[in-house]
Image: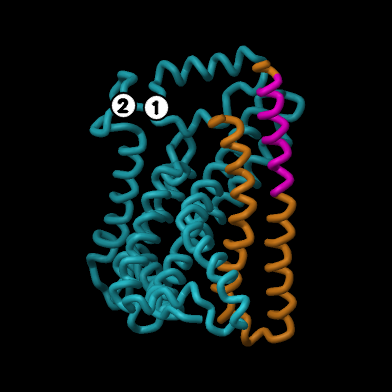
Amino acid sequence: MESLAQLGQYLGAGLACIGMAGAAMGVGNVAGNYLAGALRNPSAAASQTATLFIGMAFAEALGIFSFLVALLLLFAV
Amino acid sequence: MRGSEVATETATEHAAEGGLAFHPMDQFLVRPLFGGSEIHWYTPTNVTLWMALTVLAIVLLLVVGSRGRAIVPSRAQSVAELTFGMVHKMLEDITGKEGLKYFPYVMTLFCFIVFANFLGLIPMSFSTTSHIAVTAVLALMVFLGVTILGFVKNGTHFLNLFWVSSAPLPLRPVLAVIEVISYFVRPVSHSIRLAGNVMAGHAVIKVFAGFAAIAAIAPVSILAITAMYGLEVLVALIQAYVFTILTCVYLKDALHPGH
């Protein structure tokens, strides 16, 4: 019974890694759109780098949550 | 918390299992500095040591480095001035003039995190910011401070933060629920972002270091370690920047609630 629970733990931790794909798409989307906008209007780009980093941080946080779920499954269950 | 003997035991256990030569998470173990295995709140551990070194480095840069107060600054002084100017401008851009009152706190946060991150990149060192216990305290202080500040400055007006007046009326209660949830998730994401990034990066480097023990793929993994290390230098700075800038954004919400 214990090995079955362990199997579930490892499967769950592996499945949690799918969350990385979402974070990757989100961060890529933010950076790509920033670059597209910056190339159209380079003079406005410098003032928006802070917004870029904030957006990246928010997109990335959800990916980090999936990492946290994996860690919790492995070490805290 | 586990002591040093237990730590070496687990390390040998992992080696015996035929996996990597060492466990990638072993670097995050909290150990007492002067032997023994029990950890009380007053025991000096490697966390204590590296936090003290962080503070020492900040003092060296900001106090000793800029002691000359030269008009043409020395190298250390210009680094200190650059750091000061960057954080100052970031805070002023986001919160406006009235946020500048809280500049010392924001500057302290930035300096502590950036130095802790960079000291953690020294081989065989201990990165204090990889522990959620450390970053959670930093994030909770920001969260509590900002919430109290918001109520002190604006009174019940602060609750407008959750009542989006620009949205259509039937949608507002739904949005209020979402806003409240996202408000209380802030300290969680704020702390886990920093700890997760630092911890994950260091663990990846250690995983590649474990592969380097296998002769056939050693060159590839050493190259990978170099590349990851470069990325980690970048991440160390960017995460400190992001932590500080989010602190500024939360501060702005407290000073000017309402959308």
Chain depicted in cyan: B
- Depth order, front residue of A16/A77: A77
Residue topped by disc 1:
B1
- Provide the major secondary structure of the magenta segment: helix
Residue at position x 41%, y 43% in the image: B133
Locate residue A46 relative to residue B2 in the image: left or right.
right
- Farthest residue toward the front? B170
Chain letter of the residue beneath label 2 in the structure image: B
Instruction: Name which of mark 2 and mark 1 comes first in the sequence.
Output: 1
Which span is picked out in magenta?
A: A4-19
Chain letter of the residue beneath label 1 in the structure image: B
Query: Is residue A10 magenta-colored?
Result: yes
> Where does residue B178 sit, x and y in percent of width and height?
57, 65
Mark 2–mark 1 contact, CB under 8 Å? Answer: yes
Question: In the rendered image of this protein, does residue B47 appear above or below residue B245?
Answer: above
Q: Residues within 10 Å of mark 2 (few under 14, many from 20)?
A: some
Which quadrant, please, contains the C terminus of chain A? top right
**Residue B16 visible within the image:** yes
- Depth order, front residue of B239/B84: B239
Residue at position x 70%, y 49% in the image: A20
Amino acid bearing label 2: Ile
Amino acid bearing label 1: Met
> Where does residue B172 sit, x and y in percent of width and height?
57, 76
Residue topped by disc 2:
B39
Which quadrant, please, contains the N terminus of chain A? top right
Query: Is residue B42 magenta-colored?
Result: no
Residue at position x 67%, y 84% in the image: A42
> Where does residue B253 sit, x and y in percent of width and height?
43, 74
